[in-house]
Image (tube, grey):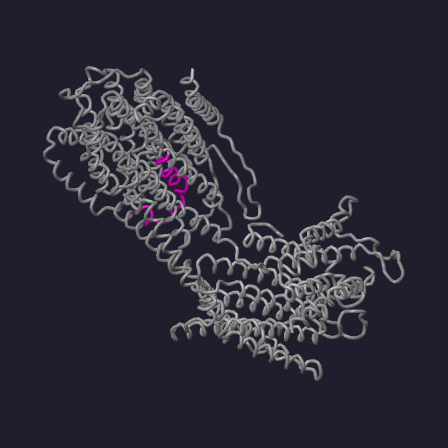
Amino acid sequence: MNLVFALAAAVLFGAGAYLLLKRDLVRVVVGASLISQSAILTLLASALTRGQAPIHPLHDAPVSDPVVQSLALTALVIGLAVTALLLVVVDRVSHAYHTLTQDDVAASEAARDAVLERIGADPEALTE
Amino acid sequence: MSASWHHAPAWTAVAAAGTAFIASLASWSRGGTAIDIPWAPTLGLRLSFTLDGLGALYCLLASGIGVVVFGYGACYLPLHLEHERESPGAQWRFWPWMALFMAAMMGLALAQDLVLLFVLFDVTAVCSYFLIGFDRDRREARVAALMALVVTGVSAVAVLIAAVLLYTERGTTSIPALLAHSGGGTTMTVAAVLLAVGALAKSAQVPLHFWLPRAMAAPTPVSAYLHSAAMVAAGVLVVGRVHPLLARSQAVLDGLLAVGLASILVGGALALAKDELKQVLAHSTISQYGYVLVLYGIGGPAGAGAAAFYVMTHGIAKSALFMTAGTVTMATGEDRLSRVGGLRKEMPLLATASGVAAATLAALPLTLGFFKDELFFKAALEAAWPMRLAAVGAAALTFAYIGRFWMGLFLGTRRVTAHPVPRLLVVPIAVLAAVALLGGVFVEPFARVAADAARVTHGSVVVLAPAYHLDARPENIMAVAAWALGGLALVVPRVWRSTVRTLATVGDRLGPRRGYTAALTAVDHLSGVLHRLEVRDLRNSVAAVLVPGGVLAALGFAATPTAGAYEIGRIAPGDDLMVVALLALVVIAALAVAAARAHLHLVLAVSVVGFALAAVYAFLGAPDVALVAVVVDTVTSLVFVAAIARLPRDVLDRGGAPPAPPSGRRWRDVLVGAIGGLALFGAIWGFLSRPSLDQGIAAEHIRLAPQAHGQAVVTVILADFRGLDTLAEITVLAVAVVGVATLLRRGRLW
Amino acid sequence: MTIAVRAVARLLLAPSLVVAVAIMVKGYSDVGDGFSAGVLVALAVSLQYVAYGRRGAEAALPFLALAPLVAGTGLLLALAVGFFPLLGGKPIFTHWPGPGVHPTRIGTLEMLTAVVFDIGVFLLVVGVLVILVHQLADDEPPAP
């Protein structure tokens, strides 16, 4: 089972990492969400015992580790909050820059920075 | 009324310096005091200050010269501010830094721990930055301040590295403990070299000397204090304190010797070439501290004693000379030798006082300076033959350039009128001149201070007995020869003038200052490149984490034994087979997410991943998690759809199926993702194959749940045992929603 | 199709509330806790939004505007249950009744402060998610 869990978590992470490198901002958010799912799967896979659900536990049969489950539950809810916030950020960026691709956002920012630099600092002030 | 209010900080500083001087004197005559407070006990760091001989010398120097210079500054600074058209309130910006500097300098003299030394080094560097850059509207001052800070601050890191090296080698950074250990080794030598480098930069020695002439952009009191007696003295203080460590390697001592000789030469030559008053004095400082380094390089009791005496005498004389330059500039409005001259008739007191100071530096009899050269020659006699010639040459050089300075100011034809200046601009110089004259007659107390300091440096008792001997001993012959040569050079300047001028131009073109400028420009350029490469593009940041992480994981995998480290694990028939099947579904869905073309496909695939994972959790005996996973996944899918529906129409039409990136880039993305996934696979499989040996708290929680009146252990954990986690989690939810509201409706929640 | 969705949405609202309460109350002895209950109710509410649109849903259910208040109440309730024991000198999250003491019962329900904490969590999750749906369901795009 270890191998299977490791494989699944690794594939989730790899897919998430691949999506994080995409230009489309929505795909970046999806990538982050996948990586979060990979972490939660690993968390549950690392339970020390596995058996019946820890509800009215019988003490002679193996019981699934409840601590790991509570942590995973917390992580799921926080993942939801973060994904929602990230998506709203992407929404605002798309409205402000009229694009969903990182390249165009970076290009507009670079253009704005160049204008600021021309107005602002004196580049010779550092040395003689 | 307001004017006198602004004078308050200056006189407070004078009072503080006076108190410090008296306290140091009292403490030294009583045999010294020590303070030792634990600072970081786990690292063995202590705040240990001890007033031993070396500490007493530098404390007396710093506070004594401080009293005089602060008094001078109290009068000079308002005139200077008026000249620069700044408000007199700027004095409040000046004196606190001067006072802090004096305190740091005294702390440096007393410090007995290398890390403490480093911290105080940096405090002095920061104070000097604000003091040199005091006329902050002038670009020249700002550039000079930055240069001083960068050169002395960066080389102070060498001191820290040396401290760390010594700590790893000997387990302590306390200087007495380090010096008590005997024995060398490469680490000790490297640490010694690093300490020397840090000290050299502080004392403005070749090749890190170029910041000192530029620092002359500071107001005169700053130069008279920092650049004659305090800041540059900090470097040789460190050399004096760790000298036993440096002396263990002859190469280090030879290095000190070489650097000192180079500084004497470069400083002296440029002092002969320069025209501006303060520049001459700055190069003179470089040259004089070269003497001190030569003496430390020679080592031995004679060298140590001579070096301590030299620092003391130089401080007194150079301070007076800087103040002279300041007074002359204030009186005539000129700051160049070629434009002033013949001031002896109009400013007789100044001429006499600065004449005494110049004579001290030139080592004429009846001044304290005579003995400094006597001790110097005595030490040089103990070294190899060439050293004696070099010593005579150095003394002649000093005679020549300081003679040129004084004669250029006060002898010759009068070229400019001198306005009368307040008494307080001349009296401090006279005070210092009087001290120098006094020392010329009663040298014994000064020799005692220097001998005490040398005892710390050399490690055993040093006897210094400078005195007038009217016989033909070698020191006297060398002294007379030096005066003769120097006098000759003064009388026939044409001999050396062109050589010195070419040297100055060459140094300017090819000198280390070019290196400093080039280094700063290169760093700025590199920062721009990195910013464009790494910060601007998020993907490069992500790849920059994943790829090295993967490489490191691979290296770790290759380096550790893998036999028996990985277990495939037991697959029980029944539930476990369902889990395997569902995980296969998860994998397929994840790959589908990666390959999805349109946004809708993306969302659908993500929700499949979520639901399949929920089913996996259910079969793993985690029904609570499964329930939450199902509902959370539903909400997530809803939020995705809502967000995509809100995208502006034109963006949606363009962005749904983005133009395929060049296939090279796509393969690069696949490769990076694969590297990350592979590294994680190895890590997780290894981690899962080695379950912890002790039970963990799970059994404890299961046992305690009925006492908490609950049968569903997970809920009990969430609401009772780990309630704080839950509280934090719901706070995260609340904060996220406030963030959403801020982004969408400027903070209105409803 | 829309009519069916609307009808189902309207019908599902009240039962989802009942189910949520049941989950919460049973949470201590069976599957479920405040989170799942809260998200369930929020899902039912979002179904209203999907079926009727933003204006229709908010016109039909005016009490939805209380969502920020509900969320705040939930957070305060949870904080109170957690930190109130500090006033009595006991560590945080010391629930009443303590171990070994029999809880008072009303019918089959047990009075536990842990359940009150869960109710706080439930209220907060409902409030937060309803606010989220409201923010996202806006018809007009916001000013850039």
In the rendered structure, the answer to whether residue B348 lies left or right of residue A41 reads left
**Residue B639 locus on image (x, y percent):** 59, 64
Q: Position of residue B64 (x, y in %)?
A: 39, 25
- Taking the view exactly as shown, the residue that stands out farthest to the front is C3
Task: Label the magenta part by its dominant secondary structure.
Answer: helix
In the image, taking residue B81 as reference, residue B672 lies left or right, namely: right
Instruction: Determine the image quadrant of residue C14.
Output: bottom right
Question: On the rendered structure, is B92 left or right of A115?
Answer: right
Q: In the image shown, does C93 or B352 lie closer to the viewer?
A: C93
Asked whether the viewer can see residue B291, the reply is no
Magenta segment boundaries in residue numbering? B231-254
Q: Quadrant of residue B671?
A: bottom left
Magenta highlight on residue B234 = yes
Question: Magenta span has B48?
Answer: no
> Does residue A120 sit above or below B643 in this rendering?
above
- x, y percent for residue B322: 29, 27
x 54%, y 59%: residue = A88
Q: Is residue B186 visible?
A: yes
Measured as percent of width and height from the top left, residue C108 is found at: 88, 62
Q: Is residue B688 left or right of residue C30?
A: left
Q: Nearer the viewer, residue B146 or A117?
A: A117
The image shows a total of numbered marks equal to 0
> In the figure, B282 relative to C30: above or below?
above
Q: At x 78% / y 62%, what residue is drawn?
A: C21
Residue B224 drawn above or below residue B592? above
Which is more toward the observer, B551 or A105? A105
Image quarter (top left, top right, bottom left or bottom right) of the N terminus of chain B: top left
